[in-house]
């Protein structure tokens, strides 16, 4: 279980964890995502918080929902590639900002 910080809403932090799992390859295209209940138990948060995170990931196109069998990572390689590029840009920018502080 990851520890959550108070500066960001927990659902946003859960979204970031899901995106990180997609970018790292832990979750691959079309892989099933754990259920809301399982994720709520893993992160020790309210299921509504997890539901919001998953719904937002769906809206952003990283997850898709199948009414009868749950949620899956998007099958769209372009969307996942854009996510990787976006996260890489964000991490590099953060690194550069931190290095500037040290000067």
Image (spheres, helix red, strand yellow):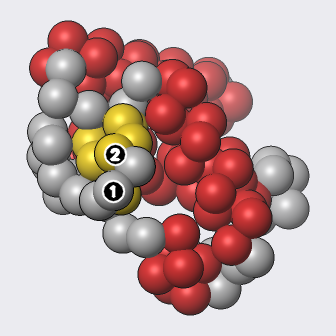
Please tell me which residue is depicted at 15% across the width and 43% down the height of the picture: 30
Residue 32 locus on image (x, y percent): 23, 58
**Mark 1 crowd level (few <14, some 14–19, many ≥20, 10 Å Cα):** few
Q: Are marks 2 and 1 in contact (CB under 8 Å)?
A: yes
Q: Quadrant of residue 49?
A: bottom right
72 and 44: which is toward the camera: 72
Residue at mark 1:
68
Whether residue 29 sits left or right of residue 70 in the image: it is left
Please tell me which residue is depicted at 69% across the width and 50% down the height of the picture: 52
Residue 61 vs 48, above or below: the answer is above
Asked whether the viewer can see residue 91, the reply is no
86 and 64: which is toward the camera: 64
Residue 95 vs 14, above or below: the answer is above
Residue 34 locus on image (x, y percent): 36, 69
Residue 47 locus on image (x, y percent): 68, 72
Whether residue 44 sits left or right of residue 35 in the image: it is right
**Mark 2 crowd level (few <14, some 14–19, many ≥20, 10 Å Cα):** few
- Secondary structure under badge 1? loop
Residue 8 vs 62, above or below: the answer is below
Asked whether the viewer can see residue 80, the reply is yes
Quarter in which the C terminus is drawn:
top right
83 and 64: which is toward the camera: 64
Residue at mark 2:
66
């Amino acid at each position: 279980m990851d520890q959550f910080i108070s500066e960001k809403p927990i659902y946003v932090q859960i979204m970031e964890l899901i995106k990180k799992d997609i970018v790292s390859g832990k979750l691959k295209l079309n892989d099933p995502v754990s259920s809301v209940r399982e994720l709520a138990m893993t992160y020790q948060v309210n299921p509504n918080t997890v539901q919001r995170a998953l719904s937002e990931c769906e809206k952003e196109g990283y997850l898709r929902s199948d009414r009868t069998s749950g949620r899956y990572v998007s099958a769209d390689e372009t969307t996942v590639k854009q996510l990787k590029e976006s996260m890489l840009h964000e991490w590099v920018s953060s690194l550069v900002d931190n290095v500037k502080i040290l000067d």
